[in-house]
Image (cartoon, rainbow, N blue to C red):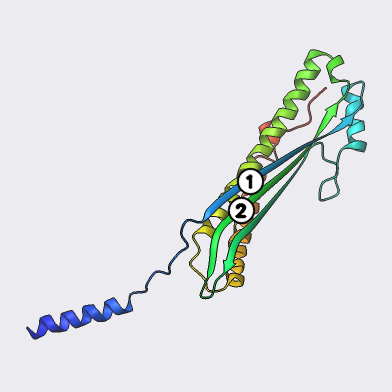
Amino acid sequence: MRYRMITLMVSLLMAGLTPVAAESYKDVKITPQTEVKMHFYDVSAASGADLQQRLLRTAPTSSAGHRAIGKAIYQLSWQLDMSQQSEHCQLYGVKVTTKVELTMPNWLQLSSLAAETQSSWNGFLSAMQEYEGRHKSIVQIAAKEIGEGVASLPVNSSCQVLRTQADAIGYQALDAAREQAKRYQSETGKGRLMGVSYPRL
């Protein structure tokens, strides 16, 4: 009987040391939003040889200052719908916005050129869009992780602290997305292995 009593006491002590899971917010509304803007810049060239020279002068510049035939800019932002109560910060929802801005060339004389030239050029543009589509997917996955991560945060007494925790989740997801994008660029030779190489026109 004494042995059973000791066993019971140890079990109770162990139960008392078991950490209690923090209460999480409930019914947090996650609102994902994607905004895509497509821009075209006109390029006037009578031939494929002429086009390349014109692109060197008119194509948009990249962040590194180099000319890029196509350009894509991705932005992620998050906004919390919350209210400071007397004893806690109430989180109602989180809105995660993905902004995509694509810039592509519009060859003005393309329709008047040979069918082979049109096919080569259009194939090149399609490969560029497919390559950038994967970048878009990486950013959208990060946006999903941010929304779900913020919605699962434990109930906090301070909205300021909650915002800081949400920002930490967001920046961590952004850093992971950047690393994944770098690996993708390396694995595809920055798109060359997917057909993103200037065609012979």
Image quadrant where residue 112 sits? top right
Closer to the N terminus: mark 1 or mark 2? 1
| Residue drawn at point x = 58 percent, y = 61 percent | 169
In the image, residue 190 above or below residue 97:
above
Image quadrant where residue 119 sits? top right
Residue 33 placement (x, y as % from top left): 63, 46
| Residue drawn at point x = 82 percent, y = 46 percent | 62
Disc tally is 2
In the image, residue 10 above or below residue 50:
below
- Viewer-proximal residue among 198 and 9: 9
Q: Which residue was labeled with disc 1?
A: 33
Q: Which residue was labeled with disc 2?
A: 95
- Pointer 1: residues within 10 angstroms few (<14), some, or many (20+)? some
User: Under tag 2, what secondary structure?
Assistant: strand
- Pointer 2: residues within 10 angstroms few (<14), some, or many (20+)? some
Quadrant of the snapshot with the N terminus: bottom left
Quadrant of the snapshot with the C terminus: top right
User: Under tag 1, what secondary structure?
Assistant: strand
Whether residue 70 sits left or right of residue 42 in the image: it is left
Whether residue 87 sits left or right of residue 104 in the image: it is left
* Disc number for residue 136: none
| Residue drawn at point x = 11 percent, y = 80 percent | 4
Residue 71 placement (x, y as % from top left): 78, 41
Q: Residue furthest bottom?
A: 2
Residue 185 placement (x, y as % from top left): 67, 44
Three-letter code, disc 2: Lys
Q: Are marks 1 and 2 in contact (CB under 8 Å)?
A: yes
